[in-house]
């Protein structure tokens, strides 16, 4: 009777340990979850074409997986590159000519005040917004690194999902 009770306590403690470890893994890897979900999404989009090429046309698994990864990289990378390429000079101009921007906003505010009679934009509010935007830049750069990390995780997981697709689906 005592041995059965001890085994029951061990099982409960082991189960509790597994639950705690699972919680910690999910908590620490939560930032990589979008990369994993992106890999699953792209796998679902490309699996039929991949399996046709590998199983019917007898292409090599790894080569076909790299071909699909390259295609998905182009689909993601080109719009991202052009968006960054188009937006970066505008942001640079805003920060390098912030005094001219403040002068333009003040002039616009004075015109609105002349028409309506109410002060729309306060100079202190403009300076507060400007300081908040400058404080936002490090946060933005950190999120950019997070996005690049998620893209790397996505392509890593996607490669192995393609190469071992049938086994992953059965699992």
Image (spheres, rainbow, N blue to C red):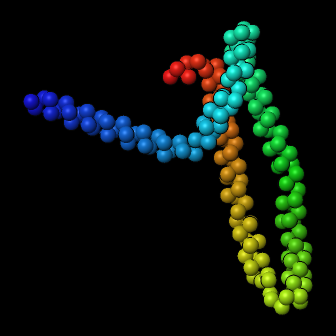
Total number of numbered discs in the rendering: 0
82 to 69, vertically: above or below: below
- Can residue 68 be spotted in the picture? yes
Quadrant for the N terminus, please: top left
42 to 51, vertically: above or below: below
- Lateral position of residue 143 relative to residue 67, left or right: left
Where is residue 38 shown, x and y percent of the image? 65, 37
78 to 47, vertically: above or below: below
Where is residue 170 shown, x and y percent of the image? 52, 20
Taking the spot 70% from the left edge, 58% from the top edge, the residue there is 138
Taking the spot 66% from the left edge, 41% from the top edge, the residue there is 149
111 to 20, vertically: above or below: below
Where is residue 100 shown, x and y percent of the image? 90, 74
Where is residue 109 shown, x and y percent of the image? 85, 82
Taking the spot 10% from the left edge, 32% from the top edge, the residue there is 2
- Can residue 110 be spotted in the picture? no
Taking the spot 79% from the left edge, 35% from the top edge, the residue there is 75
Question: Within the image, what quadrant is residue 121 found in?
Answer: bottom right
Question: Within the image, what quadrant is residue 81 found in?
Answer: top right
Task: Choose between 49 and 158: the one closer to the eye.
Answer: 49
């Amino acid at each position: 009777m005592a041995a059965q009770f001890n085994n029951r306590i061990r099982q409960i403690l082991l189960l509790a340990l597994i639950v705690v470890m699972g919680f910690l893994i999910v908590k620490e890897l939560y930032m990589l979850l979008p990369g994993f979900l992106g890999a699953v999404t792209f796998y679902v989009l490309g699996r039929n074409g991949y399996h046709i090429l590998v199983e019917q046309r007898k292409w090599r698994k790894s080569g076909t997986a790299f071909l699909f990864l390259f295609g998905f990289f182009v689909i993601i990378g080109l719009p991202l590159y052009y968006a960054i390429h188009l937006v970066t000079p505008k942001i640079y101009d805003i920060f390098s000519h912030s005094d001219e921007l403040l002068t333009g906003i003040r002039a616009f505010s004075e015109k609105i005040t002349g028409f309506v009679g109410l002060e729309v934009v306060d100079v202190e509010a403009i300076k507060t917004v400007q300081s908040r935007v400058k404080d936002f830049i490090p946060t933005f750069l950190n999120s950019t690194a997070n996005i690049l990390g998620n893209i790397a995780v996505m392509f890593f997981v996607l490669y192995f999902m393609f190469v071992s697709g049938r086994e992953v689906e059965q699992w």
